[in-house]
Image (spheres, grey):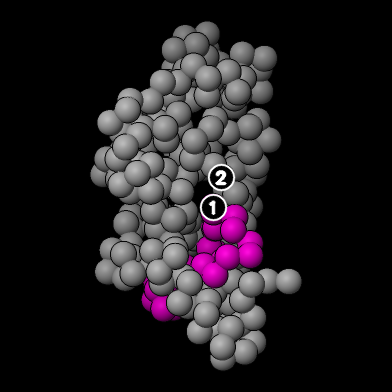
Amino acid sequence: MSRFDLSTPAGLRAAHRDYLWNDHAFLRVRFQNAHWISDELVRTNQPSPKQLEVWKARGIKTVINLRGGFDSSFYLLEKQACERLGLTMVDFTVTSREAPSKVRVRGAKEMFQTIQYPALMHCKSGADRAGIMSVLYMHFRQGKPIREAMTQLGWKYLHVRAGKTGVLDYVFDRYLAEGEPKGQDFLDWVESDAYDPVKIKEDFKAQWWANVLTEKLLRRE
């Protein structure tokens, strides 16, 4: 059973209250960290139901949730809004402090090839999980080389490379150092024995000051 019963006024109020304060939605009322990275895909932080109405009016057909959180207030409210607005909601859970699995990389490529566009893609802050998925989108869908696509992981989007979330950048750094010189494309490198997500996470070293920023001050998810 869900913690929030949206079919009742009390449950709906409780969900909105939890979303506003516990999910920090009050910080996103006027700041969406929204960036169109192509004419068919926009990346943002967690959209509210009202914001989804605006995106629907702007032509969005698909909403990609990168957070998971299937019993949370944000998810239930987002799902309800998408159903009401006729938006297709796609759940593709991504983590921000580990290298993606081979299955997740393959899944990202398949998703970007099959969803209906224009689409909106979001995590909580629009910085880290939206960042790595934007790199994969630019590479797999737009055909950009990894070195160019990596600009989607940058301070412009509030991504902090030096913190624990910098392991996302480190994945691509390793490819550029190991796979590209051998003539491997990114997916071939990921599919090879050289790609070990656990070892990559172990090898990455975050800086203490950036950890304080992302883990203590910003409290990134």
Q: Which residue occupies 73% across, 71% down?
A: 1
Helix, strand or loop at label 2? It is: loop
Q: Which residue occupies 30% across, 33% down?
A: 210
Q: Check disc 1: other Cα within 10 Å, few if <14, some if 14-19, many if 20+.
A: many
3D distance between C-alphas at marks 1 and 2: 5 Å
**Could you say which disc has been placed on residue 23 in the image?**
none
Q: Nearer the viewer, residue 14 or 186?
A: 14
Q: Position of residue 11 (x, y in %)?
A: 58, 83
Q: Position of residue 30 (x, y in %)?
A: 27, 69
Q: Where is residue 191 in the image (x, y as percent from the top left)?
A: 66, 23
State which quadrant residue 99 falls in.
Answer: top right
Q: In this view, does 204 lie to the left or right of 152?
A: right
Closer to the N terminus: mark 1 or mark 2? 1
Q: Check disc 2: other Cα within 10 Å, few if <14, some if 14-19, many if 20+.
A: many
Q: Where is residue 15 in the image (x, y as percent from the top left)?
A: 53, 76
Examine the structure image and report whether residue 30 is included in the region drawn in magenta: no
Pointer 1 with pointer 2, Cβ within 8 A: yes
Tell me if residue 158 comes above or below residue 43 in the rendering: above
The residue carrying mark 1 is: 66
Specify whether residue 139 is in view: no
Badge 2 amino acid = Val
The residue carrying mark 2 is: 94
Q: Which residue occupies 33% across, 69% down?
A: 26
Helix, strand or loop at label 1? It is: loop
Q: Nearer the viewer, residue 146 or 94?
A: 94
Badge 1 amino acid = Leu
